[in-house]
Each structure stands twice: as structure tokens, then as C-alpha cells.
Image (cartoon, helix red, strand yellow):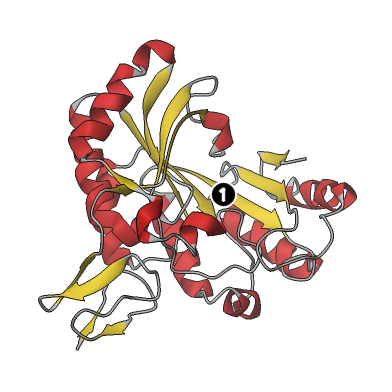
Amino acid sequence: MIICPVCFRHCKLKEGQLGFCKARRCLDGISTIDHYGAITSLNLDPIEKKPLKQFFPGCKILSIGSYGCNLRCPFCQNYEISIECQPNDYDSLSSIEIVDKALAYIDQGNIGIAFTYNEPLVSYEFVLKTFKLAKSKGLKTVLVTNGEVTLPVLEEIIPYVDAMNVDLKAFSSIAYQRMSGDFQTVKDFITYAAKRCHVEVTTLVVPGINDSEKDFTNEVIFLSSISKELPLHLTRYFPNYIYKEKITPLSLLIKYQEIAKKYLNFVYVGNV
């Protein structure tokens, strides 16, 4: 029996057992990536889609997705790869192959590599190896993450990360419990990361889960305590996966944007 050290969940795994994230397994008495280099998605995206508004705007970035996640959000927008991915649903690429692809796209405006779509840090060793190589080639590195990993993992990878978008899914322990997450872990993650690389935060406003005005006000107060310059993206929920509540009213996003602007200098509304 081992305890996986990667995220707050600290799965207790017997030999051969797969963790909650479905991406890590106990092999030879250690927690390791189950399918190293598994790739489910590869796209050249505008960097604003990460979303990053204040990191090389107007450029593109090669966006890579693998599979697995350590949360279970009932409204997951990428559940096919985060939760339900099957062994035949992915290809494999080495870090060298990914970096070569990124370099080949430079003439199309590419500045680097982003790991995104699923939760990349459940396979952080592969991300780390790829980022180290990317940095040696002059490429920028981006993470899109839920911020639900332990600080030792973050400390190991952050010297090789230029920018992050962290998905702050709610601002209460109760809401995080509904997503099988840990509220304190993401707060610690954002606080640490924002002092060491460019960080922007996204909150998908979901009716019935994180639309409490009191909680949201506490969220922007927390973010402003880190820095008033920390960009916040408020994005619109649409029914997906197993959550079927109605679409977030645009009026609510605008209201929350006005609240957030009292505390933060940069607040964006997206996915409208």
C-alpha cells in the first residue's frame, strides 16, 4: 500500500491499483503515470482561449490535452477526456515530439506549449519534462489547471512555468465538496503561484453551485489580497455532463463583473 503524493486526495493504492484521477497507478511500489505521454488533444489555439488576456495577447499557443482529473465537477466541459477517457481514445507523443511540433508552428504565431483541456498536473512528471525541454528551446510554457495539487508538486514544476490560468471553481468548502475537491488546496496554490509566475484566474459561474453573491464577494476580496492586478475571468456556464441547470444569465455575469471591479483592476466576461 502506498499513498500518492500528487494531490490533496492522497489516494491509498495497492500494487496495480488506479487512483481516483484515473491517470496514476501504483506500479512497483510507487505512484506513477499510467500511460506516459498519452495525448487526447492537440490544437494551435489563440492564447486568449486559455483564457489568458495579459500574456502575449494576439499570439497562439500549441495546446495539449491528456486525460484524467482529480475532481468530479458535475458540469465538466471536457468530461470525455477528463473523466470518461478509454485506453483507445488517445495517442502517445514524447516530449521531444511535442516540442518539435511547437517549433514547427512558430511561423504561424505560436509562442510555446500549453497543457490544458484535462487536469495536466495529474501527469506532472511528463509536463515537467516537456516544459524543461521547451524552455531550453526558447518556448513559453503555460498551464491551465484546477490548482488541486500539493505544494511540493507545484514547487517542483513552477520554475519552468511562464503563465497559468487557475480554475477557481467556487469560494466555499461546501461547493468544493460537491466537486470532490479541497477548497484550501486551491487557495494555497493560487497564493503561491501568483508570486512566482504570471497567473490569471477563471471562475465558471454555475447556477446553484457558486452563484452566491456573498461567496463571490469573498472570492474577489481574497484575490485582491494577493494582488489587485490579478486578472479574473468570469465565464458563462452551459449545461454539460450530468448538470442540467439553465444557462447562467448574462445579467448575473455583468453584476458579478461590477462587484469584482471594486476589488480587482482587470475583470473579463467570457463564453457569452
x then y, percent, for residue 109: 44, 16
In the image, 71 versus 160, the foreground residue is 71
Q: Residue at x 26, y 74 (%)?
A: 5
Q: From the viewer's perspective, is 224 left or right of 211?
A: left
x then y, percent, for residue 266: 66, 38
x then y, percent, for residue 3: 24, 82
**Where 55 sits versus 11, above or below?**
above
Category of crowding for the residue at label 1, using alpha-carbon neighbours closer than 10 angstroms: few (below 14), some (14–19), many (at least 20) = many
**Where 205 sits versus 228, above or below?**
below
Q: Residue at x 33, y 64 (%)?
A: 23
Q: The C terminus appears in which quarter of the rendering?
A: top right
Q: From the viewer's perspective, is 221 left or right of 4?
A: right
Q: From the viewer's perspective, is 184 left or right of 219?
A: left
Q: Residue at x 69, y 58 (%)?
A: 240
Q: Residue at x 38, y 10 (%)?
A: 107
Could one spot residue 146 in this view of the protein? no
Disc 1 secondary structure class:
strand
User: Label 1 amino acid?
Assistant: Val
Could one spot residue 235 in this view of the protein? yes
Q: The N terminus appears in which quarter of the rendering?
A: bottom left
Identity of the residue furthest to the bottom in this view: 1
Write down the quadrant of residue 48 in the picture: top right
x then y, percent, for residue 30: 15, 74
Question: Number of callouts in the render?
Answer: 1
Identity of the residue furthest to the left in this view: 28
Q: Which residue is mark 1?
A: 201
